[in-house]
């Protein structure tokens, strides 16, 4: 009954309050003060608060309180309902595997005071997407994993284990050199992270434990008009306009080939520009120090203005500045040696060929997420709420539809899924 009180309106209020730095207790009081009441009155909760039918969609929102006014005393029935919900949530969190609990540790830029506070918030996010019991469907199944001998930070959903094993065995058997490259000490692998898709309010496939990020420093996400324009200047290739390879092995090979060729051109371009950029950094540091002295301030300002005009008038230097601002100078310097794709082609082909729900982020339509290997969670797991998850059940048994596990990849029968390729 308590969960019927959670609405989209309340969720938006909660997100807004978290961004302002409010605590969970303050947010509970705020929600009570902005009481959201279903219009139906089929049931009663606590102290006479009307609760509509389970299928009721229309809500009436009472006027928000003055932000400067003290919080009113909450209604006893509503306070009890939220207290019950919080208690249930806290009890769930205590029963999760250690690995899943560690996934809720707040990141440095997140407004949560503890992992429990983040869990309370994220559980409501999963609930909004239709997962009434994410702790049993997802979090309880987060387990340790390795991929080509490298531990997966955060673990994965247990359903992923057979898939990882089959892809690794397939690559080791058919392309030992690619397997050795993937096993290198510099490679890192990230898995379960309860978060949204970057720039979106939708849950990432990482939030289900159904995605991997391979060596993110050297396999970046290329997204956003300014960044894509800068990469086009550097490489002559428009990363944001390629068609994805829906079903053809030749088409996927062409996508990978173009990414790899652009990566090589980027390395040459960076090696040409970075020495001058390094000298410019030193000059700017000297000018910053000169700005602090009255005797040299005017000359330093004039020189900085001259430098800025030179950069804006040079398309290559302007593009380099965009990349440095977006990714940091350390990563950009690393690209001069590593490029922007270190995942071997054999791994990409094996992943996309292992199952119709498997996708590589470099095969997206409107961006390129080189690091990302995923199982399309919404195509697979959304059915778990109403029916057996046939695709993932087949995958777990090692029986991908229409293709035996680790058989030679034939792409002509590859299933073409929907356009949701995040």
Image: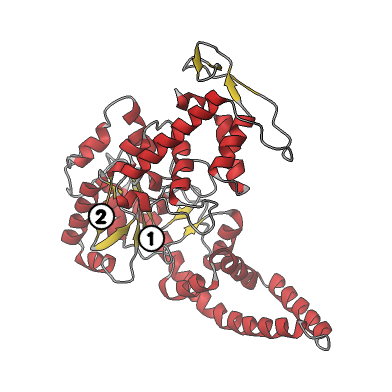
Residue 373 in view in this figure: no
Relative side of 369 to 176, left or right: right
Are the residues flagged by discs 2 and 1 in contact, CB closer than 8 Å?
A: no
> Measured from the top left, where is residue 171 in percent x and y?
21, 58
Secondary structure, mark 2, is: loop
Distance in Å between CA atoms under marks 2 and 1: 30 Å
Relative side of 412 to 7, left or right: left
> Measured from the top left, where is residue 262 in percent x and y?
46, 65
Q: Nearer the viewer, residue 192 or 417?
A: 192
Q: Residue at x 61, y 67 (%)?
A: 319
Badge 1: how crowded within 10 Å, few (<14), some, or many (20+)? few
- Identify the image's colour scheme: rainbow, by chain, secondary structure or one colour: secondary structure
Total marks shown come to: 2
Secondary structure, mark 1, is: helix
Residue with the most extreme top position: 42
Residue highlighted by disc 1: 257
Q: Quadrant of the C terminus?
A: top left
Relative side of 224 to 107, left or right: right
> Where is 226 relative to 2, above or below?
below
- Which of discs 2 and 1 lies nearer the camera? The answer is 2
Q: Residue at x 48, y 17 (%)?
A: 55
Residue highlighted by disc 2: 145
């Amino acid at each position: 009954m308590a969960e019927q009180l959670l609405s989209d309106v309340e969720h938006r209020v909660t997100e807004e309050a978290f961004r302002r730095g409010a605590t969970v207790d303050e947010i509970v009081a705020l929600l009570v003060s902005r009481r959201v009441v279903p219009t139906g009155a089929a049931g009663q909760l606590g102290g006479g608060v009307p609760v509509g039918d389970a299928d009721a969609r229309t809500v009436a929102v009472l006027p928000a309180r003055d932000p400067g006014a003290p919080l009113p005393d909450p209604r006893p029935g509503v306070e009890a309902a939220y207290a019950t919900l919080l208690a249930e949530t806290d009890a769930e969190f205590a029963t999760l595997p250690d690995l899943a609990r560690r996934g809720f540790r707040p990141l440095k830029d997140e407004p949560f005071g503890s992992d429990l506070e983040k869990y309370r918030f994220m559980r409501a996010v999963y609930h909004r997407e239709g997962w009434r019991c994410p702790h049993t469907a997802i979090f309880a199944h987060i387990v340790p994993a390795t991929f080509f001998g490298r531990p997966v930070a955060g673990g994965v959903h247990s359903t992923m284990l057979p898939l990882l094993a089959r892809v690794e065995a397939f690559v080791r058997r058919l392309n030992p050199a690619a397997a050795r490259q993937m096993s290198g000490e510099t490679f890192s692998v990230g898995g379960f992270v309860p978060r949204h898709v970057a720039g979106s309010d939708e849950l990432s496939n990482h939030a289900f434990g159904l995605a991997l990020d391979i060596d993110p420093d050297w396999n970046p996400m290329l997204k956003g008009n300014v960044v894509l324009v800068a990469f086009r200047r550097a490489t002559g290739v428009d990363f944001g306009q390629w068609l994805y390879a829906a079903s053809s092995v030749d088409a996927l090979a062409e996508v990978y080939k173009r990414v790899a060729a652009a990566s090589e051109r980027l390395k040459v371009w960076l090696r040409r520009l970075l020495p001058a950029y390094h000298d410019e950094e030193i000059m700017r540091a000297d000018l910053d120090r000169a700005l602090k002295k009255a005797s040299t301030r005017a000359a330093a300002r004039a020189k900085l203005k001259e430098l800025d005009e030179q950069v804006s008038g040079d398309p290559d230097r302007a593009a380099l500045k965009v990349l440095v601002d977006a990714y940091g100078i350390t990563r950009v310097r690393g690209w001069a040696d590593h490029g922007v794709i270190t995942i071997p082609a054999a791994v990409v082909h094996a992943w996309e060929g292992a199952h119709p729900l498997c996708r590589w982020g470099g095969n997206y339509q409107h961006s390129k997420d080189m690091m990302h290997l995923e199982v399309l969670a919404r195509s697979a797991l959304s059915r778990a709420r109403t029916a057996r998850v046939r695709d993932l059940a087949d995958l777990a048994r090692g029986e991908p539809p229409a293709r035996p596990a680790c058989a030679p990849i034939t792409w002509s029968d590859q299933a073409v899924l929907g356009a949701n390729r995040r």
